[in-house]
Image: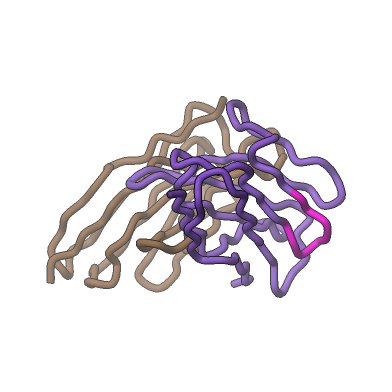
Chain colours: A purple, B brown
Amino acid sequence: GAVVSQHPSWVICKSGTSVKIECRSLDFQATTMFWYRQFPKQSLMLMATSNEGSKATYEQGVEKDKFLINHASLTLSTLTVTSAHPEDSSFYICSARGFTEAFFGQGTRLTVV
Amino acid sequence: GQQLNQSPQSMFIQEGEDVSMNCTSSSIFNTWLWYKQEPGEGPVLLIALYKAGELTSNGRLTAQFGITRKDSFLNISASIPSDVGIYFCAGTGSSNTGKLIFGQGTTLQVKP
């Protein structure tokens, strides 16, 4: 299947700092990428839909000023968690949509201390 | 909004047994996908279904897209210890935004 690379795989940051997570589709062009958040033992919760060259569409309850999404090219989308707090600690996963199917990155474990 | 109900929530089975899990929706879905997620990893696509009634296999895995387009099942035959993980169903609805809606997941444990 197609390859989606997410980086970093884990990050620990201090409260109040910002963290950037990258999502790259390595062998296909993804006009649409999705960002999810997953809490332990729970399903994936969609945060936002990112379309190349346009503003991201955020799901209800997700703060767009806190979770900045940039989709500058057909192979790269970034999620920046701004002014991170301990409650932002979670597993963040990106997904890139190919022609018909969605492929996921490896996920990023964010721990805010 | 559209939601998926996945069951069972968890299963603990003996190696060699067959496994079945399913997802249902109150509204029509255009695509059904089944993923497996292992701890600390992103979901990996197992089977994708695109047409009502479609039955697709991937090794010991078989999945079907329900005729009503409101349900799907995944079967795993002759389970082995490496089948352990969380299985998610997911689907795209009628909005055609490409957004995947996920089921709650089925945690599978296999006893050797």
Where does residue A105 sit, x and y in percent of width and height?
A: 57, 63
Instruction: Tell me which secondary structure the magenta stretch mostly adopts.
Output: strand
Which residue is located at x 27 percent, y 42 percent?
Answer: B8
Where does residue B52 sit, x and y in percent of width and height?
A: 56, 45
Compared to B98, does A65 lie above or below?
A: above
Q: Quadrant of residue B96?
A: top right
Q: Quadrant of residue A48?
A: top right
Position of the N terminus of chain B by quadrant = top right
Residue B45 visible to the viewer:
no
Residue A4 is a magenta residue: no
In the image, the segment drawn in magenta is A70-77
Q: How many numbered discs sit on the rendered protein?
A: 0
Q: Is residue A3 left or right of residue B45?
A: right
Please name whichever residue, A21 or A112, is drawn nearer the observer in this view of the structure: A112
Where does residue A10 sit, x and y in percent of width and height?
A: 48, 63
Which residue is located at x 81 percent, y 41 percent?
Answer: A55
Please name whichever residue, A48 or B88, is drawn nearer the observer in this view of the structure: A48
Residue A71 is a magenta residue: yes
Position of the C terminus of chain B by quadrant = bottom left
Which residue is located at x 64 percent, y 37 percent?
Answer: A66
